[in-house]
Image (cartoon, rainbow, N blue to C red):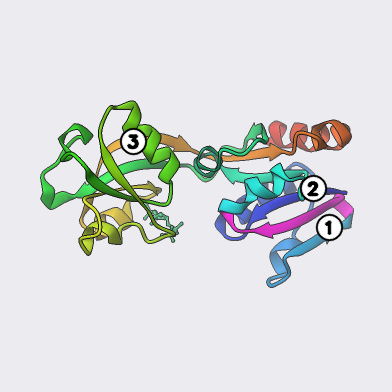
Amino acid sequence: MLRIAVAKGRLLDSFLGLLEQAGFECGAVAQASRKLVIDVDRANLRFILAKPADVPTYVEYGAADLGVVGKDILVESDKNVAELVDLKYGLCRLVVAVPKASGISKVQELDFNSRVASKYPRTAEEFFNSRGIQVEIIPLAGSIELGPMVGLSEAIVDITETGRTLAENGLVVIETIMQSTARLVANRISLKTQREAIAALAGALERVI
Ligand code: PRP
C-alpha cells in the first residue's frame, strides 16, 4: 500500500477528482471527515491528511511515500524529496504586495530596511537578496494581508489566486516571484523500494492531466 500525504481542503478535492479519472476511486477519503489516516484498499492507497506546510516533511522522513503539495510550499520547505508530476491544478502566484495608498509600484522603490511580512520567509529572503534589496522579513503563520493594515510591515510576500483578498484589504501586487501549481512528490528511498507502484500511479495521473 502506497502512503500518500495530502492536505485537506480544496486541493484534496481536486486531487481526488484527478485520481478518479486516472482509475483510482478514492471517494471514501472525502467522506471520512475527521480521520487523519484513511485506507482505500481498492486503490491500494493510504491517505495521510497533514497540514500543507508539513507535507514535504512527512515525505522527506519516509512517513509517507508520496505527497501532494503546492510548488510554493515545496520551494519554501527546501526538503529533500523528488518532484515527479506537475498536477497542473491549484494555480496561484507568489507575489510582493504593498498598500495601494503607498504609491509604490516596484520593489526597488521600497525603503531601505522595509519590513516584509510573509509565510514564505526563506523564499522572500532569497528573492530580495537576488535583487540586492535590503529588507527585514517578518515571518507570520497566516492572514499575511493584516501586516500593512496594522503597521506591522510595509509590504507582504504571499500567494494570491483570485486577487480578492489583496483587493479587499487595499493591497496591490508590485512583483510576481513565482507561479505555483500542485506537485506529486516522492520519498527518495520509496522511489526505489516501491518503484513499480509509484510509476503506475504517476503514469496514470500524467495520462489524465
Ligand atoms: C491564501 C493567501 C491569501 C488568499 C489568497 O490564504 O494567503 O490570503 O489565500 O486568495 P485570493 O487571491 O483568492 O483571495 P489561506 O486561505 O491559505 O489562509 P492564510 O491567510 O491563513 O494563509
Assess disc 1: are there few (<14), some (14-19) or many (≥20) residues with their C-alpha within 10 Å of its C-alpha.
some
> Which of labels 2 and 1 is toward the front?
1
Q: Of all residues shown, which one is farthest toward the bottom?
A: 34
Would you say the residues marked 2 and 1 are in contact, meaning their CB atoms lie under 8 Å apart? yes
Label 2 CB sits under 8 Å from any ligand 1 atom:
no
Image-based side of 24 in relation to 88, left or right: right
> Which of labels 2 and 3 is toward the front?
3
The amino acid pointed to by label 2 is: Phe
Find disc 3 in the rendering and name its residue. Answer: 176
Q: Which x, y percent locates residue 133? A: 25, 32
The answer to which of marks 2 and 1 sits earlier in the sequence is 2
Extent of the magenta region: 42-52
Find disc 1 in the rendering and name its residue. Answer: 40
Find disc 2 in the rendering and name its residue. Answer: 24
- Is 167 situated above or below 184? below
Picture residue at 87% right of the left edge, 50% below the top: 44
Q: Which x, y percent locates residue 41? A: 89, 56
Q: CA distance from mark 2 to mark 3?
A: 36 Å
The amino acid pointed to by label 3 is: Thr
**In magenta segment, residue 49:** yes
